Amino acid sequence: MLNPSALLSTSIALLIHTSVLASTTGLQTSNIGAEEYDFNCQNFIFLAKDVKLNLKDACTALKYSPEFNTFPAYFKESYLFPAYSDRVLFSWPVYLGTKRFRPGSTGNYRIVFTHFCELVGLVIVKPNKLTTDKRTVSLCPRVSKVASLPGPISNFYETKDELDRIRCGDQVMFTREFIIEATYRACRRRVALSKSRWKPAPKRLLNSDHLWISPLYVMSKIHTKGLRSDIFIVVDNGCKLQGLLYSKGVNLHHCTEAKITKPYQYGPDDHLEHQEIDDYEGRLLKKSDTFGCCNILLDNEMITKNLKAANDNFGVNSIEIKKRKKDGANENKTKDDEEDEVGYDLQYPQHTLEGDIWLWPLRLPESSILGVGKRKNQVYFMLGLNSSNKLTGVYYSHARFNRKRKFRRCLGRHETKSGSHRDVTLGPYRYNPIGG
């Protein structure tokens, strides 16, 4: 976080006529249809290159790592994306800039993607403070282009239409209403506090002796989520908004007027060119069938959707194994060499040491099950399936390290203890789960 006092005291380093970001750079994001799009979530712009990095991490974690057992999370609100009704949706935290996922506080922004690693969209998630199993989820609209007008903003209090914005660099884009309200709150604090943090605005920067500058504190906490700029408001003696600045390196720049020139809405045509998958009949479990593990109740819908993802990825593995065996035969490798190389770096489902069961990490809804993602007493859930893609059960383990691990089978409420409910084992894993 830049120190406002330090910025102001080094006014000689500031430009007398500050640079105006007048670029009309097309903000690019990951492939969705024929054109690439950015996402405008509240006051922020998530750029293509940053979304792609986060999507890569999310996809890697989904297919290769059970260690991130809180994320990817099963996305329950799939009704928000009706065009993807034949997919299983998962969510993953996304940050501003190049900041990547780390365990801990994750903020409110999520990538939504399919089990085939197709980017679906970005959403804002706001937990309900009264109950952990309910939350508000809203869509971040896509925009393909944001045009900035040259020169400082002449009038902050005039809104031409709903597409008007104020843009501060490549990460921040406000509505005028937000800035006016934030300035009003800042002015109330200025009157209430005897020692104000407001400083006289440098005359050579703003061409006036009667202006005051202060950081926009409502934005300061966002720095931990990847925001690279500080935002400053400039007011006159009557606390009327006269300017808005943002930092870039050691310099300040005027925020500029902007307009979303091509808003994009989610529509049914988004899904026309997606690869087809076999129809999936979720009849393996009745609606009343549930599994209880470690005092946690796992419901039918979540298990059924995860099993669909496991089945589809099982087919991908089968093709890869056949290819490797064919390549091994061409290279005159022994059978032991082939078995040693075939499975250790494949994505999940992973083959158990028992030989007749494959395991897929069971992805749970975000925040729906307390304690699952905690470091102490972590529990890892796996779905078991056989060579016919039939569910063999739900398994769990508390072992965290990458070594041979025993998974115990959960007992379904629809099952009897007299059945065969043996444990299974996964061997050591050789894949680096994140950041490849």
Image (cartoon, rainbow, N blue to C red):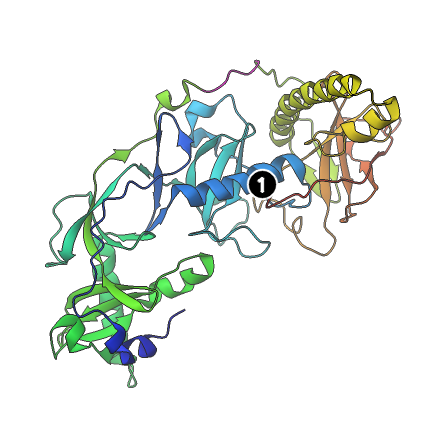
Is residue 275 on the magenta stretch?
A: yes
Name which quarter of the figure residue 353 lies in. top right
Q: Is residue 225 visible?
A: yes
Asked whether, in this view, residue 178 is left or right of residue 64, the answer is left
- Outermost residue, bottom side: 194
Q: Quadrant of the N terminus?
A: bottom left
Name the magenta segment's main secondary structure: loop
**Residue 381: percent from left, percent from top:** 72, 39
Q: Nearer the viewer, residue 290 or 68?
A: 68
Is residue 78 on the magenta stretch?
A: no
- Outermost residue, top side: 279
Q: Residues within 10 Å of mark 1 (few under 14, many from 20)?
A: many
For the point 42% across and 25% down, which residue is it? 82
Asked whether, in this view, residue 386 is left or right of residue 198, the answer is right
For the point 10% across and 59% down, which residue is it? 154
**Residue 229: percent from left, percent from top:** 35, 62
**Residue 121: percent from left, percent from top:** 42, 36
Q: Quadrant of the C terminus?
A: top right
Question: Mark 1: which secondary structure?
Answer: loop
Q: Nearer the viewer, residue 224 or 249?
A: 249
* Badge count: 1
Name which quarter of the figure residue 4 lies in. bottom left
- Amino acid on which disc 1 is placed: Pro
Asked whether, in this view, residue 340 is left or right of residue 289, the answer is right
Q: Nearer the viewer, residue 226 or 377?
A: 226
Q: Is residue 364 visible?
A: no
- The magenta region covers 274-278
| Residue with the mark numbered 1 | 72
In the image, residue 330 above or below residue 189? above
For the point 26% across and 66% down, which residue is it? 252
